[in-house]
Image (cartoon, rainbow, N blue to C red):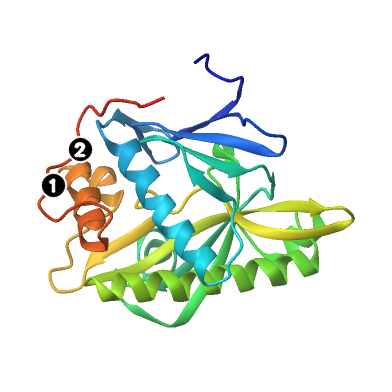
């Protein structure tokens, strides 16, 4: 079958025209990047794992009534999703201090925060995805006041869901980021969770050992990224507990 028209290629995914109007085929690449693509590699099997895990999380969100773009899985690397108008913001929810928050505020990594803290970054790699405030968002028209209230609500509901399922398998959800997009039903607009939810977009630490099971493994050269993601998938039941790490998977069209 001929490949559909490419719409966009990012650091971790390629988007193609979907089979029906208003749909997109989302293809997960094996590319790994960090520090705004200053560090790059290709890691066999990463795209397959992220596709499976994002499907798992999005399906779970649908079951509890959190709207998102996922429609169905197509194969090992691709899923059919609803086309959205992406708001140019990364919405970050932090439960524990880590990464740039630790650097900015002088907090020791792993410090539990008094409550979940929601931050926003403007999506622009050339600027380093700068941290912005609600004042910036409103002033530059990236989102309305109602949009911001809806984004906050979606982010905290995702946090409740993700924290719970991770806790159940002995993983601490340190922080994560999501993107949201607008969909239109006639004159009615609403926001839904889009992009992906995977170990690429979360910080996940083993609750007993503190072992990192997320992209910090790649950022900080802590071992095999595929092994870390496979461990997350095994614990969640996405992969059999006796499975071996995925390498050089065959794409099924």
* Residue 3, disc: none
Could you tell me which residue is drawn at 67 percent across and 34 percent down? 20
Q: Is residue 24 above or below residue 177?
A: above
- Give the percent coordinates (x, y) of residue 184: 79, 52
Q: Is residue 11 above or below residue 190?
A: above
Q: Is residue 2 visible?
A: yes
Secondary structure at numbered mark 1:
loop
Q: Is residue 22 left or right of residue 227?
A: right
Could you tell me which residue is drawn at 47 percent across and 59 percent down? 59
Name the residue at the top extreme.
2
- Give the percent coordinates (x, y) of residue 116: 48, 77
Front residue of 109 and 52: 52
Which image quarter holds the C terminus? top left
- Give the percent coordinates (x, y) of residue 237: 25, 59
Q: Is residue 239 above or below residue 111?
A: above
Could you tell me which residue is drawn at 53 percent across and 56 percent down? 178
Q: Is residue 43 left or right of residue 187?
A: left
| Proximity of marks 2 and 1: CB atoms separated by less than 8 Å | yes
Front residue of 140 and 108: 140
Q: Is residue 237 above or below residue 221?
A: below
* Residue 243, disc: 1
Mark 2 and mark 1: span between their CA atoms? 8 Å
């Amino acid at each position: 079958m001929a490949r559909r028209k490419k719409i966009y290629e990012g650091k971790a995914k390629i988007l193609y025209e979907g089979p029906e109007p208003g749909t997109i085929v989302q293809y997960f690449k094996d590319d790994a990047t960090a520090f705004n693509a200053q560090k790059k590699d290709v890691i066999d099997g990463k795209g397959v794992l992220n596709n499976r895990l994002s499907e798992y999380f999005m399906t779970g969100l649908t079951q509890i009534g959190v709207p998102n773009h996922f429609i169905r899985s197509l194969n090992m690397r691709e899923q059919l999703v609803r086309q959205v108008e992406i708001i140019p913001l990364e919405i970050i929810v932090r439960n524990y201090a880590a990464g740039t928050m630790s650097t900015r505020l002088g907090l020791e990594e792993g410090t539990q925060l008094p409550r979940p803290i929601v931050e926003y970054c403007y999506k622009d790699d050339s600027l380093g995805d700068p941290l912005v405030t609600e004042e910036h968002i409103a002033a530059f028209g990236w989102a309305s006041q109602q949009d911001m209230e809806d984004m906050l609500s979606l982010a905290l509901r995702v946090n409740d869901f993700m924290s719970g399922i991770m806790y159940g398998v002995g993983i601490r959800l340190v922080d994560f980021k999501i993107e949201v997009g607008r969909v239109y039903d006639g004159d009615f607009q609403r926001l839904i969770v889009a992009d992906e939810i995977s170990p690429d977009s979360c910080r996940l630490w083993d609750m007993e050992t503190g072992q990192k099971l997320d992209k910090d493994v790649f950022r900080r050269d802590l071992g095999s990224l595929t092994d870390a993601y496979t461990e997350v998938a095994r614990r969640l039941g996405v992969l059999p507990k006796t499975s071996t790490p995925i390498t050089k998977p065959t794409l099924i069209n």
